[in-house]
Image: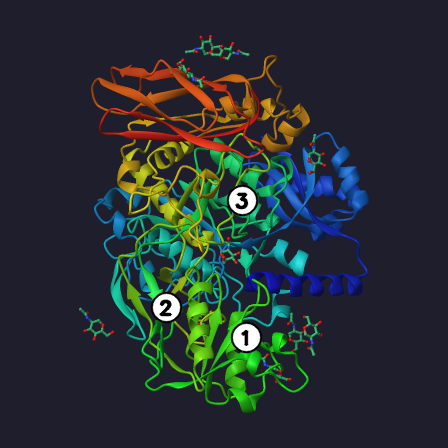
Amino acid sequence: MEVLKLFALILLFTSASANVGASNRKHYIVYLGDHSFQDSESVIAANHEMLASVIGSYDGAKDAALHHYTKTFRGFSAMLTTDQVKQLAESDSVVSVFESKTNHIHTTHSWEFLGINNLEQYHQQSMDSTSDIIIGVIDSGVWPESKSFNDYGLGPVPTKFKGECSTGENFTLSNCNRKIVGARFYYKGYIAEYGPLESFNHTFFLSARDSDGHGTHTASTIAGSVVPNVSLYGIGKGTARGGAPRARLAIYKACWFNFCSDADILSAMDDAISDGVDIISMSLGPDPPQSIYFSDAISIGSFHAFQKGVVVSASAGNSFLPKTATNVAPWILTVAASTMDREIQTNIYLGNSQVIKGFSINPTEMVSFYGLVAGSAAAAPGIPSKNASFCKNNTLDPALIKGKIVLCTLEEMLDNRREKATVIQQGGGVGLILVDPLATDIAFQFQLPGTLISLSEAEKLQVYMSSQKNPVARISRTMTTLPIKPAPEMAMFSSMGPNVISPDIIKPDITAPGVNVLAAWSPLATDNTAGRSIDYNIISGTSMSCPHVSALAAIVKSSHPSWGPEAIKSAIMTTATNQDNTKSLIRRHPNGTQTSPFDYGSGHVNPAAAIDPGLIYDFDASDIIDFLCSTGASPAQLKNLTGEIMYCKKTPISSYDLNYPSIGVSNLRGNITVHRTVTYYGEGPAVYKAQVDYPAGVNVTVTPNVLRFGKLGDKMSFRINITAYKTSNGDFVFGALTWTDGVHVVRSPIGLNIISI
Ligand SMILES: *[C@@H]1O[C@H](CO)[C@@H](O)[C@H](O)[C@H]1NC(C)=O
Ligand SMILES: *[C@@H]1O[C@H](CO)[C@@H](O)[C@H](O)[C@H]1NC(C)=O
Ligand SMILES: *[C@@H]1O[C@H](CO)[C@@H](O)[C@H](O)[C@H]1NC(C)=O
Ligand SMILES: *[C@@H]1O[C@H](CO)[C@@H](O)[C@H](O)[C@H]1NC(C)=O
Ligand SMILES: *[C@@H]1O[C@H](CO)[C@@H](O)[C@H](O)[C@H]1NC(C)=O
Ligand SMILES: *[C@@H]1O[C@H](CO)[C@@H](O)[C@H](O)[C@H]1NC(C)=O
Ligand SMILES: *[C@@H]1O[C@H](CO)[C@@H](O)[C@H](O)[C@H]1NC(C)=O
Ligand SMILES: *[C@@H]1O[C@H](CO)[C@@H](O)[C@H](O)[C@H]1NC(C)=O
Ligand SMILES: *[C@@H]1O[C@H](CO)[C@@H](O)[C@H](O)[C@H]1NC(C)=O
Ligand SMILES: *[C@@H]1O[C@H](CO)[C@@H](O)[C@H](O)[C@H]1NC(C)=O
């Protein structure tokens, strides 16, 4: 929301500064693949030499180079002209040259703290074993003084960790501890693309210290220590904690003022992988549509992470619509956002005792009733009533709103909500009621009593207002309500599939809580908190669901230290549920509409089950290469991704045969056979039976449909024959394949686009 507004500002800003600089150089990433250099210094020297060959001088090369990727793979980023890019791209040792693009954090809005525990469902798990797990968080840094990062009771930093605690502005070695085991920061890409940090008129620290709040929130959601009795404005009291409260955090700050440069992110990934993290959590991504994997920094960096056994969990984005999910590579765990069974309600009491249900965070109770006026009925002279209904600046008549609660509507989804409250306050009004479809999904915090209501509640309110000569209302203080049924529901904003890059891979993969999530905050980040300095905040976004899944990956990894990223992914996906707490299929906000795996992938996370999934679908880097070959990747493209020379097999596999934990066929003509292999993780012999939930218009047979396992590690392959008897008219149809031994339920959604029979 605001993020998008800010984006417009930044575009203006950078185009202006580009004119001034009279430079046609842009920021590019030069990717050189694997390397055999002894150390970072020799890589940097070689990079400078290569760059000097196109720039003309060694000193010029040193000035132009911004980042050197020296660890997991070789490359650099630099300000270059298109001619220089061309020359470099022609060099034999250069794999590819691509422009560093913009990513933004995947939060929609922010709010304040309530004493609720968002991870209650994880309580039953013993967390001690997670203390060897290190999660790298690529985000806006950390507020190290937060109680959530105390290291009480934690043992020494795991010896496998090779990272460092980089000092910087207001960040010393003492800001790292046994919880925050490492901290680094990256800004060269950002300033090359957007200009000096000082020019943004926002508080910032040239260090890993977080002044945006986002990174503190995501890091503490993953591995915040247990902090009892947190409460704000007395609204709620409870224990704050991360999903894996004994796990360690390595902080990689690559985002500034909600934006992150590809080149900085790639540098952070290079460091994180070589520092020895187990999991990388990235609550950020490009605006949709994302680039193909072969020229996408996040896809390339996370492929290297996958090869090195590091799980990459990333947010799908907050773009509301079908085909907008980002971070969709099969080697990334792509996370959607859904609600919890709690609501944060700020209701409205009307003069006739009726109650209108609203949502926001409102710390103060209105003790008396105030007059109620619609913005449309309070237009300033010369302003059409319709324009005034949006309560934008200089459209309302102060004489008509003074002392009143004003009812406003949105002109567009991206309207700045907080500005409306400020406009009302400046005009002498006392409260804001905003009709907003996002009401339940983002609890806003305003400078004056305010609440958001749905369209249906707005109709009730309008009936009351039109039936009264002097309608009155009062806005209550916020209270939490639970348990809410149905829950979870998909957040309205959560980005959806199908996957625009690899349509045979269902994306997102999974959903987790991402609506009104409580976690630690930077007290200096007051933009979204109506100017209040707070230590914990509640915000929404796939940015908030991603860290839940990162935490779950840490828990699974600690239970199964030998498992690779694909096994952890399989465990999390095949144990997820597509049902809500009323045993119905998960629905989507705001209208309770039907959903599909394109909303939530395999479903909502189920941590207890993910630790003991029974069976695992696995695949390795060479399977990914086969998969990419099946989708038509050329050797040159593969080299762009892996950095190595790669050839496709003579007989390519079918792209739906990647041993993925979900099953997608985007181009089904007649009959096909899909192949999968499962690995048994259990004690002693076991018998698993197949159950198929048929997608409409097909017949499905599984052969064999009974799998008998003798011992841990046994692998069994099976075929899924799909016979279409009705086309699906351009839409996907969905079903599922479930293997069960009576205890474990190993479920894979099936999504088919039936082109012909
Ligand atoms: C940062 O450090 C400076 C200099 O020590 C100090 O004056 C300032 O208060 C510090 N800021 C914060 C937010 O701690
Ligand atoms: C920052 O503030 C200066 C001076 O007030 C102003 O000229 C400039 O436009 C502002 N920049 C941004 C990005 O808002
Ligand atoms: C919780 O905090 C409140 C004030 O924030 C304090 O009055 C109360 O005693 C605390 N309770 C416990 C159990 O620490
Ligand atoms: C009212 O809104 C319309 C549409 O946004 C705009 O074109 C028009 O200029 C506005 N009128 C006034 C008087 O602001
Ligand atoms: C509205 O505009 C006036 C000037 O016309 C300005 O002083 C005020 O700050 C603006 N209010 C908001 C909320 O932007
Ligand atoms: C929800 O329903 C309202 C009223 O019927 C409609 O205007 C709105 O477009 C619907 N929203 C979505 C996302 O379907
Ligand atoms: C490799 O990446 C570069 C930069 O994105 C691109 O120009 C080139 O076309 C890619 N090569 C292939 C074969 O896709
Ligand atoms: C598809 O399967 C059906 C039933 O098994 C069979 O009768 C038919 O011949 C098959 N068609 C093709 C094209 O294989
Ligand atoms: C589906 O397969 C079963 C078993 O082969 C067969 O009896 C049935 O007729 C098939 N249904 C359709 C619609 O093809
Ligand atoms: C499944 O399809 C394969 C060919 O793709 C065929 O050999 C096999 O008999 C089929 N199995 C069933 C149960 O239809």
Q: Are marks 3 and 1 in contact (CB under 8 Å)?
A: no
Quadrant where the C terminus sits is top right
Q: Where is residue 494 shown, x and y percent of the image?
A: 48, 50
> Residue type at mark 3?
Ala
Residue named by callout 2 = 357
User: In terms of secondary structure, where does tag 1 sit?
Assistant: helix
State the image coordinates of residue 257 (x, y, percent, origin top left).
55, 63
Ligand 6 closer than 8 Å to label 3 CB: no
Residue 528: horizontal and vertical position, in percent?
Answer: 48, 69
Quickly name the residue at label 1: 419
Q: How crowded is mark 1: few (under 14 residues within 10 Å), some or many (20 or more)?
A: some
Q: Which mark is residue 705?
A: none
Mark number for residue 325? 3
Outermost residue on the bottom side: it is 399
- Some atom of ligand 5 lies within 8 Å of the CB belonging to the residue at label 1: yes
Q: What element carries label 3?
A: loop
Task: State the CA–CA distance, disc 2 to disc 3.
Answer: 31 Å
The foreground one among 353 and 573 is: 353
Answer yes or no: is residue 35 visible: no
Is tag 3's residue or tag 1's residue first in the polypeptide sequence? 3
Q: Which of marks 2 and 3 is nearer the N terminus?
A: 3
**What is the CA distance from the residue labelled 3 to the residue labelled 1?**
29 Å
Give the Cα separation between the discs numbered 1 and 2.
22 Å
Give yes or no for contact between labels 1 and 2 (Cβ–Cβ under 8 Å). no
Tell me what residue is drawn at x 75 percent, y 33 percent: 91
